[in-house]
Image (cartoon, grey):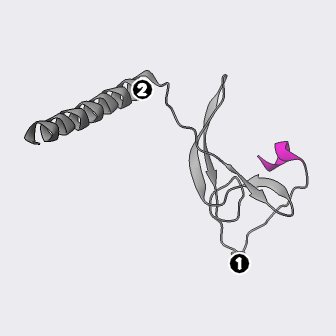
Amino acid sequence: MNDKKGNWILLTVSVLLTLMVAEVVLRFSGIAEVNASFKCFDAVIGKVYCASTEGMFNRATYSNHLVINSNGMVDQEHQITKPKDTLRVILLGDSFAAS
């Protein structure tokens, strides 16, 4: 019985060590780089930006740090009430204008 317990411990340690080595190799090689997901599904609109999301947006030719505020806009946080002596401008357009 003691021999079986030792085999299970050896197996468990071997599997954990193999997984840790694989994790280190994948992280340093960049193969397992995880990109943030910025799109969520809305029942009425369809695909929208996920509120309060931040991360790197990576494509083959460029990458950019993207911040989505709590209102689902690609921008920093803004007060709902307009401060005095502030001019607010609204744009109507496609996804290019939204960014």
Q: Residue furthest left?
A: 2
The residue depicted at 70 percent of the width and 52 percent of the height is 74
User: Secondary structure beneath disc 2?
Assistant: helix
Q: Which mark is residue 12?
A: none
Q: How many marks?
A: 2
- Where residue 79 appears, as percent x and y from the top left, is 66, 72
Label 2 neighbourhood size at 10 Å, few (<14), some (14-19), many (20+)? few
Label 1 neighbourhood size at 10 Å, few (<14), some (14-19), many (20+)? few
Which residue is at the front of the view, 96 or 2?
Answer: 2
- Where residue 82 appears, as percent x and y from the top left, is 72, 75
Q: Quadrant of residue 92?
A: bottom right
Q: Say if 77 sits above or below 2 in the image.
A: below
Which stretch did the figure color magenta?
94-99
User: Secondary structure beneath disc 1?
Assistant: loop
Question: Is 43 left, or right, of 76 in this rendering?
Answer: right
Badge 1 or badge 2: first in the primary sequence: 2
The residue depicted at 42 percent of the width and 26 percent of the height is 26
Per the image, the residue denoted by label 1 is 81
Q: Which mark is residue 26?
A: 2
Q: Say if 39 sits above or below 52 in the image.
A: above
Which residue is at the front of the view, 28 or 10?
Answer: 10
Amino acid type of the residue tagged 2 in the rendering: Leu
Q: Say if 39 sits above or below 25 in the image.
A: below
